[in-house]
Image (cartoon, grey):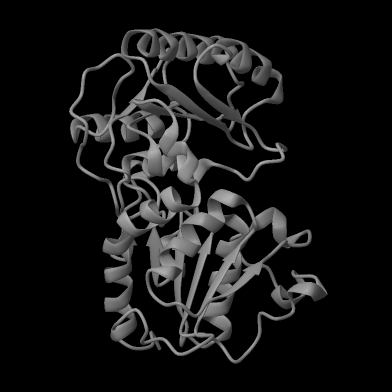
């Protein structure tokens, strides 16, 4: 089935509105069709407490502003996140199995409640209907990068080599360690002092505001910029990915590491403390495929790209072509 074979309105994207979840779900949907309806869902109690497990009266779980989850049902629904997993499972049931339900990220219950589950390889989720990309899905390809360079053309005037510094934040269940960030910043400064060039730093929503003064102080005499959420200028993240000659990423973010590796530029990190098991498995995969390097490693100017979205989209197309599940 081609990317345009789905009729208008026949692909729904459902998330909880979180940026990382939206990015993955929309990336997959946009690789399949240009015609998408997007929904953000928030579940009422008690359904929210048990999602994606189902409780009686599921149609009451959504507030009135989410009442659009109703027939005519789409051919395909894609969700990302726990609340979305409840919704994609329900749409599959409410449609009588005519909607192909694709859930991104491990739903933490048996994957056979969906037609397909897309869970990163490091989650170690297994099943006949489980697709396992290396890292997270994203929209980054050569066209996306070219568009980003066009949108942020002035970044091309910064002195090279241009280093993109992507800052994450606290991981679930783990406090943020500012000393680890300080060590990474010092390593970036040492490399810039040796090689010259500039640093384009971007903080994320998860970056604690308390560490931003430390970042600004560390980079104050380095050509480039620091952008943080709340700044007046547009988020330069796409331009940083498009223009960077190398990227340095804090070790905590699977999404940012995946997107950095999609550029084909060298990607570096600094791991100063043991990582959670899943994250360590992801780092190990990137290192073994020569896509992630130590902060001071010498690397070629390009490396193998990590772009899993089209591969996963191809597998979804195959299932769409197989017809309804019931």
Left/right placement of residue 57 relative to residue 307 reads: right
Quadrant assignment for the N terminus: bottom left
Residue at x-position 39% and y-position 39%: 243
Which residue occupies the foreground of this view, 110 or 4?
Answer: 4
**Relative to 102, does residue 126 appear above or below in the rendering?**
above
The x, y position of residue 168, in whole percent, is 54, 31
Residue at x-position 78% and y-position 62%: 44
The x, y position of residue 89, in whole percent, is 54, 71
Which residue occupies the foreground of this view, 15 or 248?
Answer: 248
**Relative to 210, does residue 104 appear above or below in the rendering?**
below
Quadrant assignment for the C terminus: bottom left
**Does residue 254 appear in the picture of this structure?**
no
- The part of the image, by quadrant, that contains residue 111 is bottom left
Residue at x-position 46% and y-position 37%: 155
**Relative to 57, does residue 288 appear above or below in the rendering?**
above
Residue at x-position 74% and y-position 79%: 67
Which residue occupies the foreground of this view, 149 or 56?
Answer: 149
**Looking at the image, which residue sits at the far right?**
64
Left/right placement of residue 299 relative to residue 157 reads: left
The x, y position of residue 317, in whole percent, is 31, 76
The x, y position of residue 4, in whole percent, is 37, 84
**Does residue 200 appear in the picture of this structure?**
yes
- The part of the image, by quadrant, that contains residue 160 is top left
Left/right placement of residue 26 relative to residue 82 reads: left
Count up the numbered dots.
Answer: 0
């Amino acid at each position: 089935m081609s990317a345009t074979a789905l009729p208008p309105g026949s692909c729904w994207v459902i998330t909880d509105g979180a940026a990382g979840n939206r990015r993955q779900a929309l990336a997959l949907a946009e690789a399949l069709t240009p015609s998408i309806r997007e929904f953000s869902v928030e579940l009422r109690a008690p359904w929210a407490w048990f999602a994606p497990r189902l409780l009686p009266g599921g149609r009451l779980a959504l507030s009135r502003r989410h009442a659009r989850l109703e027939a005519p049902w789409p051919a395909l629904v894609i969700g990302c996140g726990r609340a979305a997993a409840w919704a994609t499972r329900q749409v599959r049931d409410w449609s009588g199995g005519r909607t192909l339900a694709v859930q991104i990220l491990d739903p933490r219950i048996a994957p056979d409640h969906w037609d397909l589950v897309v869970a990163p390889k490091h989650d170690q989720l297994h099943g006949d209907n489980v697709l396992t990309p290396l890292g997270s899905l994203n929209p980054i390809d050569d066209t996306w990068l070219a568009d980003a360079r066009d949108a942020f053309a002035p970044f091309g005037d910064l002195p090279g080599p241009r280093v993109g510094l992507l800052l994450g934040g606290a991981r679930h269940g783990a406090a943020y360690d500012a000393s680890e960030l300080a060590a990474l910043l010092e390593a970036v400064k040492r490399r810039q002092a040796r090689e010259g060039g500039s640093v384009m730093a971007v903080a994320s929503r998860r970056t604690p505001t308390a560490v931003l003064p430390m970042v600004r102080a560390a980079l104050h005499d380095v050509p480039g910029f620091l952008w943080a959420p709340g700044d007046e200028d547009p988020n330069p993240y796409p331009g940083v990915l498009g223009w960077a000659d190398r990227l340095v990423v804090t070790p905590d973010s699977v999404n940012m590491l995946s997107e950095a590796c999609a550029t084909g530029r060298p990607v570096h990190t600094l791991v100063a403390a043991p990582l959670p098991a899943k994250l360590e498995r992801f780092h190990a995969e990137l290192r073994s495929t020569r896509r992630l390097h130590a902060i001071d490693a010498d690397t070629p100017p390009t490396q193998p790209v990590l772009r899993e979205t089209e591969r996963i989209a191809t597998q979804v197309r195959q299932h769409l072509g197989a017809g309804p599940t019931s």
